[in-house]
Amino acid sequence: MIVAVTGPSAAGKTTWCRRHHPEHLVAEYAPTGAEPDDGDLPAQAAFWSEVNCGRWQAAVARERASGLAVCDDDPLKLHYSWSLVRIGAASPELWALEVAANRAAIAAGRLGFADVVLVSLPSVEELHRRRDGDPTRQRRNFALHVRLAEPLREWYQALELAAPGRVRWELPPDGLPAVLPAARADRHDPAVFDALIAALPRIS
């Protein structure tokens, strides 16, 4: 099984993954400085799709090795682009390019949907409290990431409509159960992707 754990900055996803399933962890992408320039939209879309594919392949390898992969944020991180566009912080043109790139990767079997997504969405007040209580973490653009919480909810509500039973709206306090359900057969189904995109609110 491949499990993705997601939420806004300070939602507790990294702490939960490291506390309960460190041996199965697929770490979140760390910026390298080699990311493409903001002005080159096709290069950005291609680059971030490849980042998603790389994390998905790491999850598949971890699953093969131990039976379980727990991803610190969703390998299919298109929710981030959606959220930025939804609040007016990214262009609809970039969004369209990223949708096309990620769909092609799913159809090719290079990217997929996690079998289960655990979504943590604390209140804005709780996010600030956690941020202020953890001086060891540098949270870049924290105010922006707080604004992305509601679009993130919209994204996973749409995924739940497209693939019922895939989304869980909490991080289990004791970690994942010892006995897990089988992997889903629709990990690489473009129809699920199309249904997800169709279920999202319209971008004005």
Image: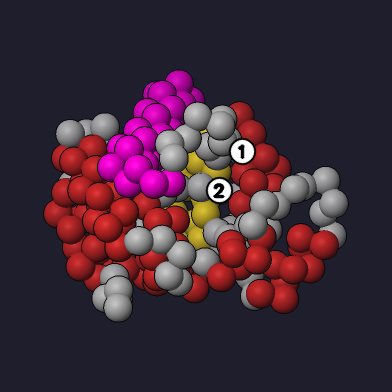
Does residue 179 appear in the picture of this structure? no
Q: Quadrant of residue 37?
A: top left
Rendered position, 109 above or below 152? above
Name the N-terminal-most of marks 1 and 2.
Answer: 1
**Residue at 85% of width from left, 51% of height from top?**
135
Q: In this view, does 188 lie to the left or right of 38?
A: left
Report how far apart the C-alphas of labels 1 and 2 lie in the structure.
8 Å
Callout 2: SS: loop
Amino acid type at mark 1? His
Given residues 96 and 179, the one toward you in this image is 96
- Bounds of the magenta span? 38-67
Q: Mark 1 points at which residue?
A: 21
Q: Is residue 142 left or right of residue 157?
A: right
**Residue at 16% of width from left, 49% of height from top?**
190
Amino acid type at mark 2? Leu
Q: Are marks 1 and 2 in contact (CB under 8 Å)?
A: yes
| Residue 119 is one of the magenta-drawn residues | no
- Residue 156 position, x and y percent, is 39, 64
| Residue 63 is one of the magenta-drawn residues | yes
The circle on residue 107 is: none
Q: Name the residue under label 2.
A: 176
**Residue at 40% of width from left, 56% of height from top?**
81
